[in-house]
Amino acid sequence: MPLNVPIFLTWLRIAMIPLVVGLFYLPDTWLSVSVRDTLAAVAFIVAALTDWFDGWLARRWNQTSAFGAFLDPVADKLMVCAALIVLLDLSRVDAFISLIIIGREITISALREWMAKIGASASVAVHWLGKFKTAAQMVAIPCLLYDQTLFGLSTRVWGNVLIVVAAVLTVWSMLYYLQRAWPAIREKAG
């Protein structure tokens, strides 16, 4: 396993997951709800920024690796799924929305693994739909974690709008990837 700055940032993102989740298990006497929510949102934003930054550094410094390409999406999926479960527990996101997003992440991960195994991973390469889905999630989730008014706007309202947009893009991108993979699946499964 190579260890460089981009991979370290990816590991840092994974290590931040228990921090974000753990904040919601602290006694209310330790932190007020608003401070807890603020810290969780900030930690999620920092983790999300490392997602962009580690990829940028890996390309810029020519430190891309097969392990980094594997670990980066795993870190993203763990981070999003953990945050959605916390938000579900707090009744800040609908169970159906969480199920759609988490189910898609599992489905597309399995699809990518299968396509790599049969030598057809190019057919499920990252597409702009997936990038927009990720962007919508990465803005919606901290808005829902924060759950306060910011500049006179309710972050819960904006977070709910964006998480629905993310869910729609989630289904759309999943259908796109399945359609792209279907010919290879049909050929290999038959």
Image (cartoon, grey):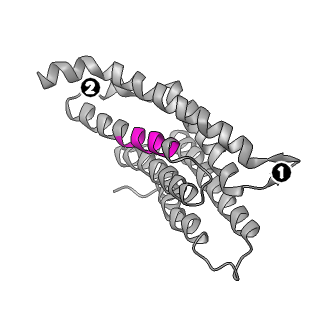
Q: Position of residue 59 (x, y in %)?
A: 51, 39
- In the rendered structure, does residue 103 fall within the stretch colored magenta? yes
Mark identifier at residue 120: 2
Above/below status of 141 relative to 169 = below
Residue that mark 1 sits on: 150
Closest to the camera, between mark 1 and mark 2, is 1
Above/below status of 37 relative to 162 = below
- In the rendered structure, does residue 148 fall within the stretch colored magenta? no
Residue drawn 23% across the image and 20% down it: 184
Q: Identify the image quadrant of the C terminus.
A: top left
First to last magenta residue range:
97-106
Whether residue 135 appears in this view of the structure is: no
Q: Identify the image quadrant of the N terminus.
A: bottom left
Residue drawn 15% across the image and 24% down it: 188
Residue drawn 53% across the image and 58% down it: 13
Above/below status of 186 relative to 16 = above
Of helix, strand and loop, which one carries label 1? strand
* Nearest the eye: 8 or 98: 98
Q: Amino acid at mark 1?
A: Leu
* Nearest the eye: 34 or 124: 34
* Nearest the eye: 34 or 13: 34
Whether residue 45 appears in this view of the structure is: yes
Q: Residue furthest bottom?
A: 29
Q: Position of residue 45 (x, y in %)?
A: 65, 53
Q: Residues within 10 Å of mark 2 (few under 14, many from 20)?
A: some
Q: Position of residue 67 (x, y in %)?
A: 36, 49
* 163 sits to left or right of 12: right
